[in-house]
Image (tube, rainbow, N blue to C red):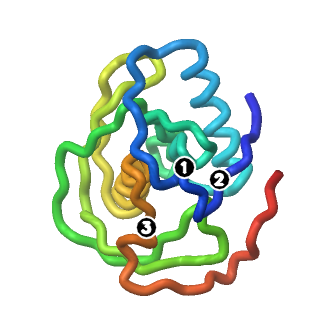
Amino acid sequence: MAIKIIVKDPDPVLREKCKPVPKITPNIHKLLNDMADTMYDAEGVGLAAPQIGILKRVIVMDVGDEHGLIELINPEIIEREGEQFGPEGCLSIPGFTGDVKRAARVKVKGLNRNGEEIVIEGTELLARCIQHEVDHLNGVLYTDLAEKMYRSEQEDRDDA
């Protein structure tokens, strides 16, 4: 397990569409572990593989709810419902927050680290996080969707 360097905007890797993971291997397990370590070290709630320079459809999330750490391989949002509007930030865009409109409830399916299909339903922060991380896999940043951007109070981190 290792803490990776988080890629910052405007690095072009953040604008690439990620490739599906064809087979779950020990390297994918290591990637999931490294991504979780990196996310927790950066005090984030989600991280997508392109944020550490890897163009694979892999995300990790932990919004501090009953789900705990969520690891999803090849995630796909299969349902969206309602609407929420609120602040969003990103580890790849430190020092900024933006107001983004998202679905209030989403259902996502993907594979867990054992290759089993799982379906997770999220509302509020989890729904926002799922949508944000899946967007990363398609080269979309929250700044593309934000109605207004703000300089955040949080200091820019200099993790190396």
Q: Which mark is residue 7?
A: 2
Disc 3: CA contacts within 10 A as few (<14), some (14-19) or many (>=20):
many
Separation of disc 2 and disc 3 at Cα? 15 Å
Task: Specify the farthest residue to the front.
Answer: 12
Q: Which residue is mark 3?
A: 142
Residue 47's spot in the image, x, y percent? 55, 48
Mark 2 vs mark 3: give the one in front: 2
Residue 75's spot in the image, x, y percent? 34, 37
In the image, residue 56 sits, relative to residue 38, either above or below, namely above
Q: Which residue is mark 1?
A: 13
Relative to 139, 1 lies left or right: right
Residue 140's spot in the image, x, y percent? 40, 58
Disc 2: CA contacts within 10 A as few (<14), some (14-19) or many (>=20):
some
Q: Name the element at disc 2.
A: loop
In the image, residue 8 sits, relative to residue 20, either above or below, namely below
Which of the marked residues, 1 or 2, is nearer the chain's N terminus? 2
Which amino acid, mark 1? Val
Mark 1 vs mark 2: give the one in front: 1
Q: Residue at x 40, y 44 (%)?
A: 17
Which amino acid, mark 2? Val
Looking at the figure, which quarter contains the N terminus? Answer: top right
Q: Residue at x 25, y 58 (%)?
A: 105
Which amino acid, mark 3? Tyr
| Residues at circles 1 and 2 in contact by the CB criterion of under 8 Å | yes
Q: Residue at x 30, y 74 (%)?
A: 101
Q: Name the element at disc 1.
A: helix
Please count the marks in the image: 3
